Image: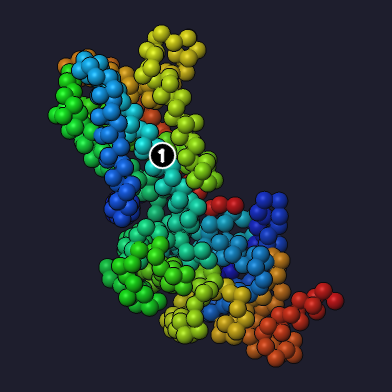
Amino acid sequence: MRVRDLRVVRGKRDVLHGLTFEIARGEVVGLLGPSGCGKTTLMRALVGVQVVAGGEVTVLGEPAGSAGLRRRVGYATQAPALYADLSVAENLRYFASVLGAPRGDAARVMDEVGLGRHRDQVAATLSGGQLNRANLAVALLGEPQVLVLDEPTVGLDPVLREELWELFRELAGRGVTLIVSSHVMDEAGRTDRLLLMREGEILADGTPGALRASTGAADLEDAFLRLITGEAA
Amino acid sequence: MNPSITLATTRRILAQLRHDHRTLGLLVGVPALLMVLLRYVLDQPGLFDRVGPLLLGVFPFVIMFVVTSVATLRERTGGTLERLMTMPLGKLDLLLGYALAFGLVALVQVGAVLAISLTWLGLDLRGPVAALVVVAVLDALLGMALGLLASAFARTEFQAVQFMPAFVLPQVLLCGLIVPRDQMAGWLEAISHVLPLSYAISAMQELTREPAVTATLTRDITIIAACTLLSLLLGAATLRRRTP
């Protein structure tokens, strides 16, 4: 995945000012930064639903959003995008047939996110965390090669969060590239690589260990603070 | 376009309606109730024979407009449209999926109203019943297509609901239901010529008068179908894969 000089303007505001980076296949990349820094906009550009003002985004060798990528890239928005009046299974079966995913894929992803017991529950009656997992399950349908996940672990208890990260690791082991945004710093340590964003720019890019070492900080939260204040000074 | 995706979309929309018993009840019950009211308000069999079929062209049109504009607005604001746009779903798959699902609902709706009208209410229709069903279902589809288009201009459900009076009531006033179109001021008549509901009413009037399918009826049906298609295509143009 390659991003070159990506610029996005929303309204009259410059949201992303010329981002450039590359992500290798099978890498788990964390996208970190305060809310409003452009994480979601960047992710929308990666899946090709964002109008961009300039630059190039290439995913699996094709321009982002091109028809050939629509079965190979899974995307989960931050706000669950599901039909509230359908059950979990009905939602998944519908999206599975749109993707042309094999029969049984809906059941597989429900188990992967631990929603098997709630399959017949109408989405509107799910808890926030369950809804988030159902939303993530849609992105897993059809075994995409790239997963773009916007805050997939918000509202989950530590045990579930642990399970999901194990799942992400397992997927990466199979060669799936994951881009996961978060603003929880302790999660960031589980990635291969972190992109720290602030106000539409990439502040730092490296492994969690390298970021800690280069700033001399004990944890990532501290490292992030040092990077921001270091820049201000 | 992909038929299996279109049909999956139709199934999904019907499943949503199946979960929503109240909406389903309102969709079928309200037009039937209005028809019963109309029959007893007019209280003259001859008058009901003339006016009843006209309203059978208007009710499904209005109801489908409202239901579709809110349903598609929900897709737009709820994020499901964006999600579908990242998937291999063509815009026509979505639109035809809606058209098929709501076409089926319209068939049930019109069937129920017609069954009550022809038996209990004693409607005496001169033209063929099948032609009336075709016109009524086409009217419903026209309402659906316009609702789809209107939803693109609404940001909230409040706005979407208000588009009903804005898009629909002027057509109801000018379609010849209240005053025959040739008795209106010239400029009003000219406007009525370009509003699709005028042709729905004209078709229904033809069915109350003529026992066979006439050239006027065929022309009206063609115009309604063309307007439906045009609105669907314009609606498709408002669905964007990329948004700002």
The residue depicted at 54 percent of the width and 46 percent of the height is B155
Residue furthest to the left in view is B119
- For the question of whether residue A193 can be seen, the reply is no
Image check: B29 left or right of A109?
left
Residue A55 vertical placement versus B68 (above, below): below
The residue depicted at 67 percent of the width and 84 percent of the height is A220
Q: Which of the 4 quarters of the picture holds residue A121?
A: bottom left
The answer to which of A101 and A91 lies nearer the viewer is A91
Q: Which residue is mark 1?
A: B66
- The kind of secondary structure element at disc 1 is helix
Q: Which of the 4 quarters of the picture holds residue A40?
A: bottom right
The residue depicted at 79 percent of the width and 77 percent of the height is A229
Spot occupied by residue B53 in the image (x, y as percentages of width and height): 26, 24
Image check: B131 left or right of A216?
left
Chain on which label 1 sits: B
Spot occupied by residue A232 in the image (x, y as percentages of width and height): 82, 74
Q: Amino acid at mark 1?
A: Val
The residue depicted at 27 percent of the width and 39 percent of the height is B29
Quadrant in which the N terminus of chain A is drawn: bottom right
Local crowd size for mark 1, using a 10 Å CA cut-off: few (<14), some (14–19), many (≥20): many
Quadrant in which the C terminus of chain A is drawn: bottom right
Spot occupied by residue A230 in the image (x, y as percentages of width and height): 80, 79
- For the question of whether residue A76 can be seen, the reply is yes
